[in-house]
Amino acid sequence: MIARKRLIAIGVKLGAACLALAATNGCTALVVGGAAAGGYVVAKDERPVGQMIDDGTITASIKSRLVADKYVSGFDINVDTYQGVVTLTGDVTSYVARDQALRIAGNINGVSSVVDNITVNGKAN
């Protein structure tokens, strides 16, 4: 039972990493696992697979919290994570939204720092 829970947890992490990596641009795809069994698409990268999974999990955690937040429109902010450093990029309508997005990202386990590339434009999208 414990082994099954561990496999499920690994699958969830890998799935989250794959979703996050699928959104990146300019990467060559590599299939991990049996292609006939579905496999996962992982971008070619210099990071070890474990680091890519951790970064993908961080990105997915931040993005899901941004989407659920009442002050931030998570669809207006791009989240990139590389070796624990999170970069937030996008346009928001208020400083409250920007500050909340930065706070959400900084409070995620595994984040070493947050780079703020968010523009406050004051216009509703």
Image: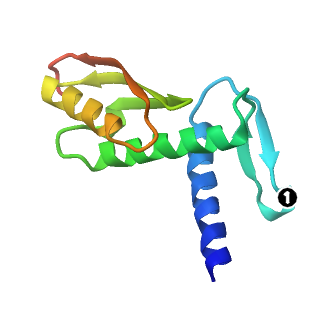
Query: Going 40% across and 26% down the picture, which residue do you hit?
Result: 113
Please, is residue 121 above or below residue 44 in the view? above
**Residue 74, position as x, y percentages in the image:** 32, 39
**Residue 78, position as x, y percentages in the image:** 42, 30
Please, is residue 34 above or below residue 74 in the view? below
Query: Going 62% across and 68% down the picture, which residue do you hit?
Result: 6
Viewer-nearest residue: 43 or 47: 47
Please, is residue 46 above or below residue 43 in the view? above
In-image side of 84 versus 40 (left or right): left
Q: Answer few, some or many: residues within 10 Å of disc 1's Cα (few below 14, many 20 plus, some between 14 and 19).
A: few
Query: Going 77% across and 56% down the picture, which residue do you hit?
Result: 39
In-image side of 82 versus 27 (left or right): left
Q: Number of marks in the image? A: 1
Viewer-nearest residue: 55 or 90: 55
**Disc 1 marks which amino acid?**
Gly
Query: Going 31% across and 42% down the picture, which residue do you hit?
Result: 66
**Residue 76, position as x, y percentages in the image:** 33, 31
Q: Which residue is mark 1?
A: 34
In-image side of 104 versus 110 (left or right): left
**Residue 110, position as x, y percentages in the image:** 46, 40
Residue 94 visible in image: no
Can you name the residue that lies furthest to the bottom here? 1
Residue 15 visible in image: yes
Picture colour scheme: rainbow
Image quarter where the N terminus lies is: bottom right
Q: Secondary structure at mark 1?
A: loop
Viewer-nearest residue: 122 or 55: 55
Q: Quadrant of residue 124?
A: top left
